[in-house]
Image (cartoon, rainbow, N blue to C red):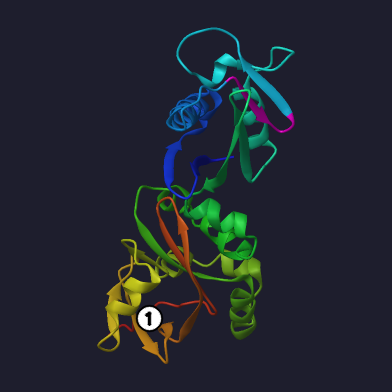
Amino acid sequence: YGDVFFEDNTFFGTYTNEEIDAGQAMNDIARYLGALYRQEGSTITSIEFAGTSFTWNEAGTLLGSNWEDAEGNTLVSAIVAAFISDEDTIELTLSDGFNSLSIAFELIVALDIVDTAIAADDFNTLVAAVIEAELVEALRGEGPFTVFAPTDAAFTALLEALDATPEELLAREDLADILLYHVVAGEFSAEAVLDLASDGPVEVATLGGATITISVEDGNVFINESQVIVPDVFATNGVIHVIDSVLLPPVEVDQE
């Protein structure tokens, strides 16, 4: 389920899978909720989650693992189970026996560029190409990267233009060069891209070495001749802008 973070309209924190499994996130949230509730002048006596009431099992520091239901199951284990079952929102109701306060935490799965493309399910050819070109680990790296990602429809159009099959595309010796022509070092949001090309077309170097031309026409962003159709798909190590055609790096002509 990837890294996660919680927010109640403000950023809460980021946790790794191991920290989630160890209950660290829930411990921190329990402390946060306890402090929040005490600001209202009350002390928590029970927490309700998913229709189950959890009570404090001993005096001491407020930790998520110390809240148990009638059968001895901890609040931590209940919420971790919700993560695994892909619940989008974690809702807790705190009570002091007289009044209650409900808090909702949104669960957001934070994925790297490769996993974001996989999850989107509209980049199957792109993902297959990245795997074939052995670029998965590179694009999972710290980055940050800006990726101009062609959709499956864009690759279908390219294959028709080249009169080639998907297998022939994946077997090309320049496959890695083609893919790296879609990647720029640094994280450039849509706003940053617009600023970059605000005074006219600008050339930007790609990770493949060749340059792309970024231009803006009537508020639309173009990468060479390809248009950005979905901007700002953020990942943990950069941003993806979806484009409507595949970019091909310029072919070098030997000079005799």
Classify residue 171 by image quadrant.
Answer: bottom right
Classify residue 170 by image quadrant.
Answer: bottom right
**Compared with residue 213, is residue 137 higher up or lower down, i.e. above or below?**
above
* Local secondary structure at mark 1: loop
Residue density around tag 1, few if under 14, some if 14–19, many if 20 or more, within 10 Å: few
Q: Is residue 229 magenta?
A: no
Q: Which residue is located at x 56 percent, y 14 percent?
A: 66
**Compared with residue 120, is residue 201 higher up or lower down, i.e. above or below?**
below
Q: Which residue is located at x 34 percent, y 79 percent?
A: 194
The percent coordinates of residue 151 (x first, y second) are: 59, 71
The percent coordinates of residue 59 (x first, y second) are: 51, 7
The amino acid at mark 1 is Pro
**Compared with residue 119, is residue 73 higher up or lower down, i.e. above or below?**
above
Task: Return the residue nearer the eye: 18 or 124.
Answer: 18
Question: Which residue extends farthest bottom?
Answer: 218
**Compared with residue 43, is residue 147 higher up or lower down, i.e. above or below?**
below
The percent coordinates of residue 197 (x first, y second) are: 30, 82
Q: Which residue is located at x 59 percent, y 55 percent?
A: 118
Residues drawn in magenta: 45-51
Q: Does the magenta stretch include residue 46?
A: yes
On screen, residue 110 versus residue 81, left or right, reads: left
On screen, residue 16 versus residue 98, left or right, reads: left
Q: Mark 1 points at which residue?
A: 250
Quadrant showing the C terminus: bottom left
The percent coordinates of residue 138 (x first, y second) are: 41, 51
Task: Return the residue nearer the eye: 151 or 32.
Answer: 32
On screen, residue 87 versus residue 216, left or right, reads: right
